[in-house]
């Protein structure tokens, strides 16, 4: 029989870098009662469950001192009512400006999911200049490098804490320019549109 050769093209989600970009947002820290010297760890999901790594954040905050704060966005009412008191929980929001402010105010963004097909929130956080921590077992590792964050190869909270400490050692500003550059050059909506046009033309 004739073996058909299939060419596969990967086109990622496009990020609107005019919307998702670094902002000075000291006011949102004040509204959330977070001191400017506190290291903020952010997580965002449409639906939080163990698959998305909800329990991991509880383990993380228990191993860090009071100079760290976790913010989780996208929690339901039950999760908000049963949340660890050291974690700031927020419901899901479709307010892009609020998301941009949260991404921008964080010192690191953690995508604790192990089943990501891309990791839209990871790219959004990077577009806002925030370094990210992701697992090697997801597609997120395709968009992250050592100048934009950390890729975790092992499992367990210890690996995550080690990555957090690495980000803290270098400082957020060490990563910011590379994060925004990476998204603009590889994952912006303009780049993805060009990729779609190129794909369609190649099929004509």
Image (spheres, rainbow, N blue to C red):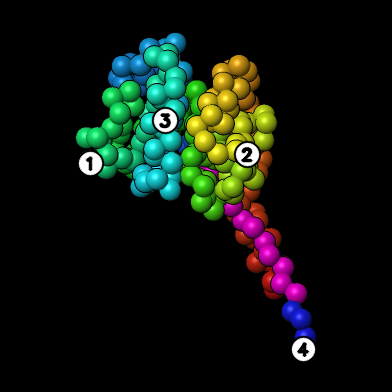
Q: Which residues are magenta?
A: 5-17
Q: Earlier in the sequence, mark 1 or mark 4?
A: 4
Is disc 3 surrounded by few (<14), some (14 to 19) or many (20+) residues within 10 Å? some
Q: Disc 4 versus disc 3: distance between alpha carbons?
A: 55 Å
Q: Is residue 164 visible?
A: yes
Disc with the residue nearer the chain's start (4 vs 3): 4
Q: Is residue 120 magenta?
A: no
Does residue 199 lie above or below 35 as drawn?
Answer: below
| First in residue order: circle 4 vs circle 2 | 4
Q: Residue lying farthest right?
A: 2
- What is the distance, in whole Å, between disc 4 and disc 2 at their CAs? 42 Å
- Dot 1, how many residues are within 10 Å of its Cα: few (below 14), some (14-19), or many (20+)? few
- Residue 75 lies, in percent from the top left, at 31, 40
Residue wearing tag 3: 59
The reply, left or right, for residue 118 in relation to residue 98 is: right
Q: Earlier in the sequence, mark 2 or mark 1?
A: 1
Disc 2 target residue: 153
The residue located at (54%, 53%) in the rendering is 117
Q: CA distance from mark 2 to mark 1?
A: 32 Å
Cα separation, mark 3 vs mark 2, equals 18 Å
Q: Secondary structure at mark 2?
A: loop
Q: Which residue in the structure is indicated by mark 1?
A: 78
Of the two numbered discs 4 and 3 in the rendering, the one whose residue sits closer to the viewer:
3
The secondary element bearing badge 4 is classed as loop
| Label located before the other in sequence (3 or 2) | 3
Mark 1 residue element: helix
Do the CB atoms of the residues marked 4 and 2 lie less than 8 Å apart?
no
Name the quarter where the C terminus is drawn: bottom right
């Amino acid at each position: 029989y004739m073996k058909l050769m299939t060419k596969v093209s990967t086109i990622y989600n496009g990020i609107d870098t005019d919307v998702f970009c670094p902002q000075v947002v000291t006011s949102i820290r004040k509204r959330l009662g977070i001191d400017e010297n506190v290291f903020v760890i952010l997580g965002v999901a449409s639906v939080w469950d163990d698959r998305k790594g909800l329990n991991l954040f509880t383990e993380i905050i228990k191993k860090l001192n009071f100079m760290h704060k976790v913010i989780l966005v996208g929690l339901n009412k039950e999760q908000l009512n049963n949340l660890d008191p050291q974690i700031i929980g927020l419901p899901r929001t479709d307010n892009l400006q609020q998301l941009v402010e949260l991404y921008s105010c964080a010192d690191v963004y953690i995508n604790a999911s192990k089943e990501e097909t891309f990791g839209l929130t990871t790219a959004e956080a990077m577009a806002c200049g925030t370094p990210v921590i992701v697992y090697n077992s997801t597609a997120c590792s395709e968009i992250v490098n050592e100048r934009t964050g950390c890729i975790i190869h092992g499992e367990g909270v210890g690996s995550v804490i080690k990555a957090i400490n690495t980000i803290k050692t270098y400082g957020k500003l060490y990563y910011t320019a590379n994060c925004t550059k990476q998204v603009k050059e590889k994952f912006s909506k303009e780049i993805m549109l060009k990729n779609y046009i190129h794909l369609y033309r190649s099929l004509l």
